[in-house]
């Protein structure tokens, strides 16, 4: 039996016990896990140093090494994340609906765990802990498959968490790490129907596309964000400036940052140049349609491919449009349906935008950067769903649950 | 461009219009569709006669021909189905949540259509109309791929519905039928990410497995039901008899009928023989574990494969178990997580069964035959989901929807 099948089967064995745990038991386990991480931080940091060393030797870029690196302060932050998850309301067991039928059947719809969740992710070792915490809090077993570049860190973290779980009501078997660094272990997870109930990919678009296109297990697609901000003719210039800068540059590496600014022709005539100047100061590289490059001498020409690219960087496309219709058309063509914004004082245009744009989150007069579990008040999130089934947008704990109908009868049969 | 891509793209073009239609417009369209079907029944029956003739020539079994056959009464029933869908509450536009954040952002979670739904199904031409009605009522465009044995009927039905939609606010383009009878057209639909938002298979387990194992488009898995009824030591004998007979024999061909009866050893000693006699009278063929065949001389031995088979027929497996634990174990091993029942007077055992059995619908003292949209009071259903993501159990109209967040700001940016 392969490592993947073996560990997924071990995880599945615990599903029944996990589904029946009390909230208090689960929260207590999360707190014990958090304490163990802090207590064993030196060992984790030592294991992390091995990953960093291997990364340096193989020429991994500094920015990637930074994502991988752990120190006491980051481990404390990760442990605090578990404490926060312990503080969130537990959705399991919630009665979503109750109804009585004319024949006397009493039907309850109850929130239950999904079962066994597979998480496939890249280098950041904090995902190992976050995902474990969110899944266990919702009574799910979890099979983690992190990037091989973080394998030493992940192994040590799981060793620490397994030992911690030994003191709790959660069976340590509920938490599994796939250590096989070969891609074949990912491929195997993707086809593990019957052992995994869902797979959630977390990472770059190549990782996500591989999962979406090859999994036979149900998938919750997360992530990719080609987000637009449309500055309408009647936009307040100060607000337009501050929202545009924030959406692009407050943290360009994340999925809810802006990649393309659409500007109404009338607005552009007066206000685009000062806006471009502000971007130049950061600096953000500008790529524009022909009208844009005519107005902004330092803007490079944007290709069709640029408009279809998630830069996650200090680069911005600008396109001047004739009005809302053209903006909506551009968004429909290039959006990944993540987060889209209109800045306008025209209530009618705002309403049309919010109604017609097909995306997880549509904004009027606010930065797309707010599409986030914490910003929405949900707390820690397993990801931001960009698909339409099951969950859409920031996924709080309820996104990690399913439901079942409990039907209470007194001998009813169907006529 | 292939027929599949072409028609899916045409359907997708209408998604924006469909999402914005009023409930009144959609209901009016459904009523006009229903009237058209009744008015044009003779033409539909003539087209159906072609399918039946082809089926007879190719040696299709009588029971299959019966499923395919249309007459005035069946067409009237199908049209009434559309009227009923028109009478159901429209979930689109419902505010699922509203909340205000400390920074003043006002967030609404609104129900929206899924977009374009692909339905892959077999011979029954009534599915063509039901699926069209349910999808259009929820503002979804729909791409239908029915079985080739019903192609003439389906073509005529779609022609009638297209003409009817011409008089309504729903663009007729929103309803597409794939006519290519080759399997390649199904394969093409399964990979149509970007044009189809979800695929729902309706049919036998081979069709469903093909979709689940090959689709890259998200799927809602429906259907297969290996359902169990467990008669506990303390079951009321009269109730146990009537529930068992109903679950097996009231309509054996459907997914919520019982395939295996689990019987507590103490209960079996006194009550299994009279129960077996009742099944013999119907007649239902019995296949049992060694203890069962020792008690019931006419029962055949049941193999492991029998316990893993959805008969959809007058055949029943019987297994005698030592108690609730063994029953739960058998169910965990063989259940397709559709509908499971315990008959008992022991409240503790009933609660444990309802809690621990992992299935869409778990029953105490009622027949599994109630797992059905109409019986639950949801009205017409697109299917019964046996997966845990998105929807579980009978899927009413809300299962054909997604949501989006509308965020109303006044210039908020992220700090």
Image (cartoon, coloured by chain):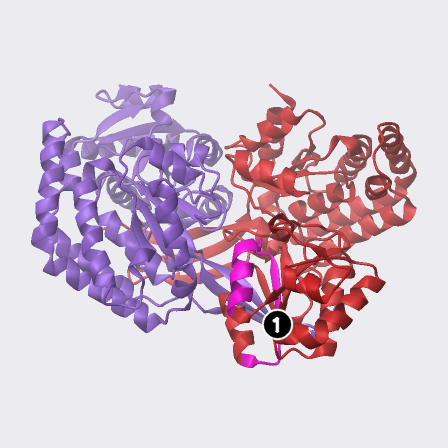
Chain colours: A purple, B red
Q: Is residue B378 above or below residue A225?
A: below
Image quadrant for the C terminus of chain A?
bottom right
Q: Circle 1 sits in a helix, a strand or a loop, which is it?
A: helix
Q: Residue sitting at 65 percent across and 50 percent down? A: B306
Mark 1 belongs to which subunit?
B
Q: Is residue B103 above or below residue B150?
A: below
Q: Residue sitting at 45 percent across and 51 percent down? A: A391
Q: Which picture quadrant has residue B232?
A: bottom right
Answer whether residue B330 is magenta in the image: yes
Q: Residue sitting at 39 percent across and 33 percent down? A: A209
Answer whether residue A356 is magenta in the image: no
Residue A178 drawn at (x, y percent): 30, 43
Q: A239 or A155, which is in the foreground?
A: A155
Q: A27 or B351, which is in the foreground?
A: B351
Q: Is residue A58 above or below residue B129?
A: above
> Callout 1: 10 Å neighbours few (<14), some, many (20+)?
many
Count of picture labels = 1
Residue B389 drawn at (x, y percent): 49, 51
Query: Can you see residue B227?
Result: yes
Query: Can you see residue A414?
Result: no
Residue B339 drawn at (x, y percent): 62, 60
Image quadrant for the N terminus of chain A?
top left
Q: Is residue B50 left or right of residue A182?
A: right
Q: Is residue A231 above or below residue B241?
A: above
Q: Residue sitting at 13 percent across and 26 percent down? A: A59
Q: B404 or A17, which is in the foreground?
A: A17
Q: Is residue A316 left or right of residue B55?
A: left
Residue B238 drawn at (x, y percent): 74, 77
The magenta stretch spans which residues?
B325-347
- Reading the image, the residue beneath label 1 is B265
Q: A307 or A18, which is in the foreground?
A: A18
């Amino acid at each position: 039996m392969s490592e993947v099948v073996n560990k997924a089967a071990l995880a599945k064995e615990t599903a029944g016990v996990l589904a029946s745990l009390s909230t208090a038991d689960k929260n207590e386990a999360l707190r014990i896990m958090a304490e163990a991480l802090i207590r064993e931080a030196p060992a984790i940091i030592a294991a992390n140093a091995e990953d960093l060393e291997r990364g340096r030797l193989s020429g991994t870029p500094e920015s990637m090494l930074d994502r991988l690196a752990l120190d006491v302060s980051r481990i404390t932050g990760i442990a605090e994340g578990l404490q926060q998850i312990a503080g969130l309301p537990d959705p399991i067991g919630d009665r979503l609906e109750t109804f009585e039928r004319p024949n006397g059947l009493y039907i309850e719809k109850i929130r239950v765990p999904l079962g066994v969740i597979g998480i496939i992710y890249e280098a950041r070792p904090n995902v190992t802990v976050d995902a474990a915490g969110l899944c266990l809090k919702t009574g799910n077993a979890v099979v983690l498959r992190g990037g091989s570049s973080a394998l030493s860190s992940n192994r040590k973290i799981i060793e620490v968490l397994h030992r911690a779980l030994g003191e709790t009501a959660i069976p340590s078997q509920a938490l599994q790490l796939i250590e096989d660094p070969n891609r074949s272990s990912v491929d195997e997870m993707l086809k593990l129907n019957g052992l995994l109930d869902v797979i959630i990919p977390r990472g770059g678009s190549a990782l996500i596309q591989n999962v979406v296109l090859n999994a036979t297990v149900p998938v919750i697609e997360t992530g990719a964000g080609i987000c637009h901000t449309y500055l309408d003719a009647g936009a307040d210039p100060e607000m337009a400036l501050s929202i545009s800068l924030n959406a692009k540059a407050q943290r360009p590496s994340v999925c809810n940052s802006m990649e393309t600014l659409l500007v109404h022709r009338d607005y552009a005539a007066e206000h685009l140049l000062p806006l471009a100047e502000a971007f130049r100061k950061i600096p953000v590289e500008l790529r524009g349609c022909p009208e844009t490059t005519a107005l902004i001498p330092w803007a490079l020409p944007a290709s069709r491919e640029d408009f279809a690219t998630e830069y996650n960087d200090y680069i911005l496309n600008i396109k001047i449009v004739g009005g809302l219709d053209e903006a909506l058309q551009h968004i429909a063509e290039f959006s990944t349906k993540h987060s889209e914004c209109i800045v306008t004082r025209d209530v009618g245009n705002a309403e049309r935008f919010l109604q017609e744009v097909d995306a997880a989150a549509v904004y009027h007069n606010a930065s797309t950067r707010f599409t986030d579990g914490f910003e929405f008040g949900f707390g820690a999130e397993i990801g931001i769903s960009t698909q339409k089934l099951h969950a859409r947008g920031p996924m709080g704990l309820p996104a990690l649950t399913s439901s079942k109908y409990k039907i209470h009868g007194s001998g009813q049969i169907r006529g």
